[in-house]
Image: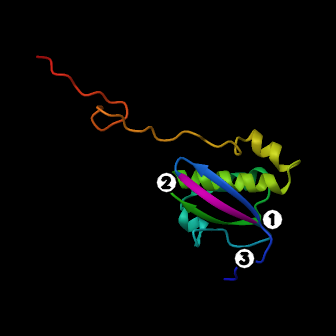
């Protein structure tokens, strides 16, 4: 496989929970990859395919672009949402007048800021659980 370092690409970062995805969006036809694996192999299943391809389907650009992604941190679903967010942000950079309003309306440019709540002292190992008090 040829190195893409000398080709022109659009760079964007997508985040979700503790996952961070660095996305490179290339024009033309090619193999989309995540961490040097085919994207269909990394995020297997039809539902996952619908999620990561939603930004491309929204702007009707499935055959016009392909992506290479490096994703770190979090779990599978956090990484999937981070990749989706990164692809949407890269597409918004391609054509601000045409793509950005459509992606914004679909809610793909908004970062989901919900993160895991930290554990508190004296809660018995959970964030909100209270220790049970003895009755007598």
> In the rendering, which numbered label is found on residue 38?
none
What residue is shown at x 59% (from left), y 65% (from top)?
Answer: 40
State the residue position of label 2. Answer: 74
- Tell whether 129 sits left or right of 80: left
Q: Is residue 24 magenta?
A: yes
Q: Nearer the viewer, residue 120 or 33?
A: 120
Image quarter hosting the N terminus: bottom right
Q: Earlier in the sequence, mark 1 or mark 3?
A: 3
State the residue position of label 3. Answer: 4
> Residue 33: horizontal and vertical position, in percent?
63, 69
> Residue 120: horizontal and vertical position, in percent?
36, 34
Majority secondary structure in the magenta region: strand
Q: CA distance from mark 3 to mark 2?
A: 27 Å
**Which element is circle 3 on?**
loop
Residue 104 in which image quadrant: top right
Q: Is residue 89 magenta?
A: no
> Residue 87: horizontal and vertical position, in percent?
70, 56
> In the rendering, which numbered label is found on residue 64?
1
What residue is shown at x 50% (from left), y 57% (from top)?
Answer: 73
């Amino acid at each position: 496989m040829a190195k893409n370092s000398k080709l022109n690409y659009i760079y964007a970062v997508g985040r979700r929970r503790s996952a961070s995805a660095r996305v490179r969006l290339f024009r033309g036809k090619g193999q989309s990859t995540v961490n040097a694996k085919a994207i269909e192999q990394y995020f297997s299943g039809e539902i996952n395919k619908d999620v990561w391809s939603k930004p491309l389907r929204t702007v009707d650009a499935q055959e016009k672009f392909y992506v290479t992604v490096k994703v770190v941190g979090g779990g599978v679903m956090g990484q999937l949402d981070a990749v989706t967010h990164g692809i949407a942000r890269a597409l918004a950079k391609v054509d601000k007048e045409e793509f950005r309003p459509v992606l914004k309306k679909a809610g793909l440019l908004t970062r989901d800021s919900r993160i895991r709540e930290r554990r508190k002292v004296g809660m018995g190992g959970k964030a909100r659980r209270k220790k049970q008090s003895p009755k007598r």
